[in-house]
């Protein structure tokens, strides 16, 4: 028999939380209605930002006594810099679901300084981490089919299982 470790104890707590609240993520995903509160006049379309998603989800999280934590990390891949955003859902201070997305910083973007370029990539990456965590489908969004800007960040989302969180 294995001796108890801190990781085993954490795993037990997370699994117990999941057993007791197995439908909580599904309920949050079902209840969430994140409107497209932004307008791109150049492309003539509506879209939702990370802030729109956060504004819509906060009351639902409060109802279910959950916390949402979003972290950014700068990652170098080859010679390019990516913003890695992870959105993590926790109950009783224990994470039980997360999603990660990456957005590449544009090398240059007309009218933006370096800090603005990083901020734009961060916002984009957060939006897609939240989309993945809360099962928001953006395939009908203009971001999905936007052809007017070739400097758009490239994103990749990675859903994380509860076991990978430990």
Image (cartoon, grey):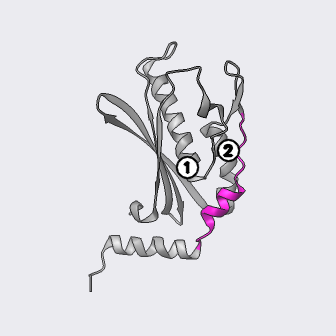
| Horizontal arrangement in the rendering, residue 160 relative to residue 8 (left or right) | right
Name the element at disc 2.
Answer: helix
Name the element at disc 1.
Answer: helix
Q: Residue at x 72, y 35 (%)?
A: 37
Residue 93 part of the magenta-drawn span: no
The local crowd at label 2, few if under 14, some if 14 to 19, many if 20 or more residues have their Cα within 10 Å, is few
Residue 26, position as x, y percentages in the image? 63, 63
Q: Residue at x 71, y 57 (%)?
A: 31
- Residue 65 visible: no
Residue annotated with mark 1: 132
- For the N terminus, the quadrant is bottom left
Q: Residue at x 35, y 74 (%)?
A: 8
Residue annotated with mark 2: 55
The local crowd at label 1, few if under 14, some if 14 to 19, many if 20 or more residues have their Cα within 10 Å, is many
Front-lying residue, 138 or 21: 138
Instruction: Choose the circle earlier in sequence order: 2 or 1.
Output: 2
Q: Nearer the viewer, mark 2 or mark 1?
A: 1
Q: Is residue 119 above or below residue 85?
A: above
Tell me, for residue 1, which label it has, or none: none
Q: Is residue 42 above or below residue 127?
A: above
Front-lying residue, 63 or 156: 156
Span of residues in magenta: 21-37
Q: Is residue 166 above or below residue 107?
A: below
| Horizontal arrangement in the rendering, residue 113 relative to residue 61 (left or right) | left
Residue 132, position as x, y percentages in the image? 55, 49
State the CA–CA distance, disc 2 to disc 1: 17 Å
């Amino acid at each position: 028999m294995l001796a108890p470790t801190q990781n085993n104890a954490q795993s037990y707590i997370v699994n117990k939380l999941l057993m007791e609240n197995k439908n909580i993520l599904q309920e949050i995903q079902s209840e969430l209605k994140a409107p497209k509160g932004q307008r791109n006049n150049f492309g003539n379309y509506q879209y939702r930002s990370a802030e729109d998603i956060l504004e819509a989800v906060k009351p639902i999280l409060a109802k279910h006594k959950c916390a949402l934590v979003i972290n950014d990390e700068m990652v170098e891949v080859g010679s390019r810099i990516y913003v890695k955003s992870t959105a993590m859902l926790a109950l009783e201070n224990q994470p039980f679901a997360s999603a990660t997305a990456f957005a590449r910083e544009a090398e240059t973007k007309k009218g933006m300084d370096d800090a603005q370029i990083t901020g734009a990539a961060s916002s984009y990456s957060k939006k897609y981490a939240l989309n993945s965590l809360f099962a928001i489908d953006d395939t009908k969004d203009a971001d999905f089919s936007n052809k007017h800007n070739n400097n758009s960040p490239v994103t990749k989302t990675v859903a994380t299982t509860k076991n990978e969180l430990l």
